[in-house]
Amino acid sequence: MYHFTSYPIFDNIYNKCFENTLEAINTNRPLQNTANHHLWSFMVGLCCGTPYILTASTLKAWFTSADVSIIVIGWLSIINIFYLLKFIWAPFFDFYNPFGYKSVKGWAVLSHAFMGMMLIVLSYCDPYIHTGLTISIAIVVSFFGSCITLALDGYWIRFIQGQKVSTFSGITEVGYRLGKIITGGCTLIIADHFDWHIVYMCSGFIIILLGTVMFFAPEIEHRKNNHQPNYLNAMSNSFQHIFHHGTWVLISFLIIVKVNEALEHHLLPVFMIRHLQLSLTTVGIITKFIGIISNLIGLGIAIKLIDLYKYKNSLFVGLVIHVIATMLYLLLCYTPLPNIPFLTFITLIDNISRGIISTTLLAFYASQINQELSATQLSIFSFLTGLSGIFFAPIASYIVFYFGWQTLFLTSCVLTAPSLILLLLLNNELERKRHLKILLHFRLPQIKRNY
């Protein structure tokens, strides 16, 4: 799920961009209690920020601590493929509601319950002794986590209709980032002082508790229409709409733009724990607390860059900064270890660049999306951009295993070149949709989906 934070310095930009747009949004019901609905907006963000990290960086840190092969750890990225494939069942969530519920919120409540139970089961596994079983259960956890984010994406869009979108976006963003800190940073600190069994056991109860809270969230009925839901038509229309707005150059760019990030980012916990010999507490503080703050800085920079210089230039700045950060990681390998101040600085630069790239891409997505199938088309765009993260992460593990960390970072720098070349050919496509009038309506941050 994606969000944008409301910064005071950008309030004028938000108001100018959305003043006329908000008047045109169709509402299903008025929101009477502003404070109450601010709370529910925060809860939606919190619920969407917690699931993904538990089967991403936190799971890799667990496998790293258990001394599992880096080859296996690299392949763990495949577990989260459901977050990319959720566009397959997105129309089902848009068209149907669980028994006893009037909105897509029901899918979120049920998914919370099942994910929480599977996390408790996962807590009893040993990734070193029962590697296959642990991965199998983690796959199930990932599926229900993707269902949570998919359901709450649709719920949130309906929930904020007719309201000041920038305000609700900021509140939701706070909850989203807090959720990532809890399951990404706090879990590593707990594991460092207690045990991984405690980490995933507590995470399971937290997920169940969040689902219980969302059970009491306001019901929002689906908007009625005159045509019968048709899955094949929904998927066909979504793909046709997306490919109608982009040439093969654009599609290729979306697929490879995050190759360099995929090569290095998915193995950074392993790099810090094994190569730099850092404690889990230190890794949690650097990667999540500092990383998320710097990512928010990148988000704010991206909004300003898009408004002033359009999508192309914003992406160019983000890619160049990311190359610089990767070169600094390469330099870190040749400095006396552990060099925590230098690592903290690199993490700051790296996450700022990722925030700029992710935010700019999602802003471009929002400008291309047909609102009638917003959840489905958002999922398809995320699928295109996330392909590299799923399939290049295992390649990164082989590079490290056979050639070392220095080769990995150098390869990541070199593979940025194709993205920059394609970007030069995307001037017209990216500049064609300059305004941000739909951006916060869809509450896009992911990033994501791919920090």
Image (cartoon, helix red, strand yellow):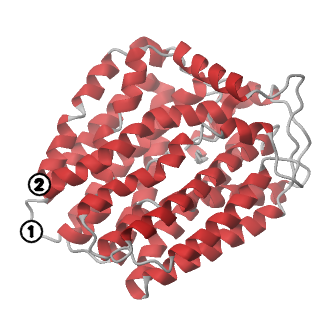
Q: Is residue 24 left or right of residue 6?
A: right
Residue 402 has which mark? Answer: 2
Which residue is located at x 42 percent, y 78 percent?
A: 189
Q: Amino acid at mark 2?
A: Tyr
Q: Locate residue 386: give its quadrant.
A: top left
Q: Amino acid at mark 1?
A: Pro
Instruction: Tell whether 407 sits left or right of 384.
Output: left
Q: Give residue 58's mark.
A: none
Nearer to us in this view, 348 or 197:
197
Task: Give the Cα separation between the discs numbered 2 and 1.
Answer: 23 Å
Nearest the camera: 223 or 238?
Answer: 238
Which residue is rendered at x = 88% and y = 43% of the image?
221
User: Mark 2, mark 1: which one is toward the viewer?
Assistant: 2
Pointer 1 local density, CA inside 10 Å: few below 14, some 14–19, many at least 20 = few
Q: How far across and down, in percent of the image, does residue 328 sit? A: 18, 51
Residue 335 x, y percent position in the rendering: 9, 63
Q: Earlier in the sequence, mark 2 or mark 1?
A: 1
Q: Secondary structure at mark 2?
A: helix
Identify the secondary structure beneath mark 1: loop
In the image: residue 241, left or right of residue 63? right
Question: Would you say residue 441 is visible in this rendering?
Answer: no
Tag 2 and tag 1, C-beta contact below 8 Å: no
Residue 346: image x %, image y %?
Answer: 26, 55
Say if 112 sits above or below 250 in the image: below
**Which residue is under mark 1?**
336
The structure residue drawn at horizontal position 62% and vertical position 64%, both measured from the top left corner, is: 115
Q: Quadrant of residue 148?
A: bottom right
Against 231, is 355 above or below?
A: below
